[in-house]
Amino acid sequence: MHPTLSTPGNLLLEALSAEDRARVDRRLEAVDLPTGMNLYVPGQRMTHAYFPVAGVVSMVSELEEGTVEVGTLGREGMYGLPILLGSPETTTRAFMQVPGHGFRMDADALRAATAEIPAFAALLHRYTQALFEQVSQSVACNRLHTLEERCARWLLMVHDSVGDEVLPLKQTFLADMLGVHRPAVTIAAGALQTAGLIRYSRGRVQVLDRRGLEAAACPCYAIVRAGFERLRAQSPG
């Protein structure tokens, strides 16, 4: 089911003033975002920017040795920053990890909107910084923290984006996102389940104890979340 332009959901769009939001809305198109849908692949020209209302976008680097996630976003942001920065392509693949829906904006329309609406341009530039901090934090996290901590962090990020207690996550996807083999994911998720924090079976994760999951996660989750909260706090909307 498509959202309407008045449907609350994407936190970036909601951060705009009513006047600026109306000007941006005229350039948006509602879209479904099914599981596995590629928003971009390396070497392809970017034609649209996406503003998810529901669902999770994973940005991954695909190498001969395997696939590793380099960024995650949901309704707190948008995908298509290279368009804003003047680059027509990206070296990473972005696809829907968890299905959802949202809006998209034509590349030319995005460039026009940021030129005509200073508050929209400033918001997206601040979001660029927040996303850069997330990616930087993920690099440190992958190097310094345990798999169980990283698994808890990633589940919290998905939980924030989905807004539901039950997360549709296949074990293969979770292994790719954490950069490990499936048996390692089984052990990490099993530890969280034994602690009573989640229930994990048949490609579905149910969050049972949100506070406990936050306590089990590494500090990276709180750092990244604080960055996105600052982004909204600085917005006039």
Image: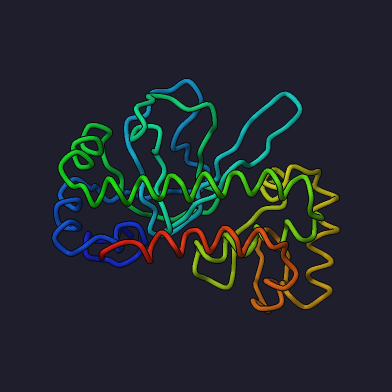
Residue shown at 76%/27% (left/top)? 65
In this view of the protein, which residue sits in the foreground, 23 or 121?
A: 121
In this view of the protein, which residue sits in the foreground, 195 or 32?
A: 195
Measured as percent of width and height from the top left, residue 224 is found at 57, 58
Measured as percent of width and height from the top left, residue 57 is found at 50, 48
Residue shown at 55%/40% (left/top)? 59
Measured as percent of width and height from the top left, residue 173 is found at 66, 47
Residue shown at 27%/42% (left/top)? 105
How many labels were placed on the picture? 0
Horizontal side of residue 28 vs 78, given as left or right: left
Query: Measured along the vertical axis of the image, is residue 146 above or below residue 41?
Result: below
Quarter placement of the C terminus: bottom left
Q: Quadrant of residue 54?
A: bottom left
Horizontal side of residue 52 vs 42, given as left or right: left
Query: Measured along the vertical axis of the image, is residue 8 above or below residue 129?
Result: below
Measured as percent of width and height from the top left, residue 175 is found at 73, 47
Q: Residue furthest top?
A: 43
Query: Measured along the vertical axis of the image, is residue 23 above or below residue 163?
Result: above
Horizontal side of residue 227 vs 209, given as left or right: left
Residue shown at 54%/62% (left/top)? 225
Quarter placement of the N terminus: bottom left
